[in-house]
Amino acid sequence: MGKLEGKVAFITGAARGQGRAHAVLMAREGADIAALDICHDLPYPRYPLAIRGDLEETASQVRAHGRQALELVADVRDSAAMADAVAKTIAAFGHIDILICNAGIADMALTWDITEEWWDIMLDVNLKGYWLAVKYVVPYMLAQGTGGSILMTSSVAGLRGEPGMAHYCASKWGVVGLAHSLAQELAPHHITVNTLHPTAVNTDIIPGMAQAAEMATEDLVEFIRHGNALPVKLIEAEDVANAGLWLVSEEARYVTGQKLTIDAGRMLK
């Protein structure tokens, strides 16, 4: 029996990258998955986002582990769309036990060069989107009365400043404040809330950010490598998912309000 047998996980940003890694690992451990992604580009960031085919591939990999997958196309910034996605998940599975707030974007610009549109989209996707997921999932968790787990993807940039990423850092620090407040509110209901803080992860965002910064991908990766204490360029999405699995499992049932770094020692520097 897997660590998440009989559970249902609602995961945002599930079409590729870290979201897909969470979905596939949790399915392997027995969870059914509601996988949500926007599946179209936005005016910002300055690189392509996931497409419908990516979301279908995530669902296919979930089903390969013998679990059910519900594909949900929605914009995490859209209140009505998020309410509908959560309602569809309840209709399909009857309950939600795990919420993974993971949908996010990143881009680079000096603080004074960030446009108002860039700022608004960054904060809306990376922070408002998390709040809306919480807003519509938590009432069902409370009504179930069986506890639950909420996991939010922050970053090492949610623990310190990073040059050229003020809007991204602001959003990821905001995630920590949201999570810590929520952890206190939900503790009496046996619902844990924690944040993940990875260093740079080997996903499509890396070449996208390099493109936006007019850098060669290998130059950006080399810059990142120098910031890690361990001799590694990028960590893998599965490394983050492994940490997340522990936090949403019974093994971490008394762990809440914590910031777990998967950073190759980046915060040591």
Image (cartoon, rainbow, N blue to C red):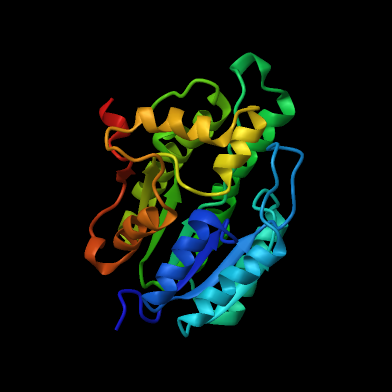
The C terminus is located in which quarter?
Answer: top left
The residue at the point 29 percent across, 61 percent down is 246
Residue 186 vertical placement versus 195 (above, below): below
Residue 250 shows in the view = yes
Q: Picture coordinates of residue 134 (x, y %)?
A: 52, 55
Outermost residue on the top side: it is 112
Q: Picture coordinates of residue 54 (x, y %)?
A: 64, 63
Residue 7 placement: quadrant: bottom left
Image side of residue 24 versus residue 231, left or right = right
The residue at the point 70 percent across, 36 percent down is 46
Residue 94 shows in the view = no
Q: Picture coordinates of residue 149 (x, y %)?
A: 38, 61
Outermost residue on the right side: it is 43
Residue 71 placement: quadrant: bottom right
The N terminus is located in which quarter?
Answer: bottom left
Q: Nearer the viewer, residue 263 or 223?
A: 223
Image side of residue 122 versus residue 254, left or right = right
Q: Picture coordinates of residue 268 (x, y %)?
A: 25, 29
The residue at the point 46 percent across, 24 percent down is 162
The residue at the point 30 percent across, 45 percent down is 258
Residue 207 placement: quadrant: top right
Residue 90 vertical placement versus 82 (above, below): below
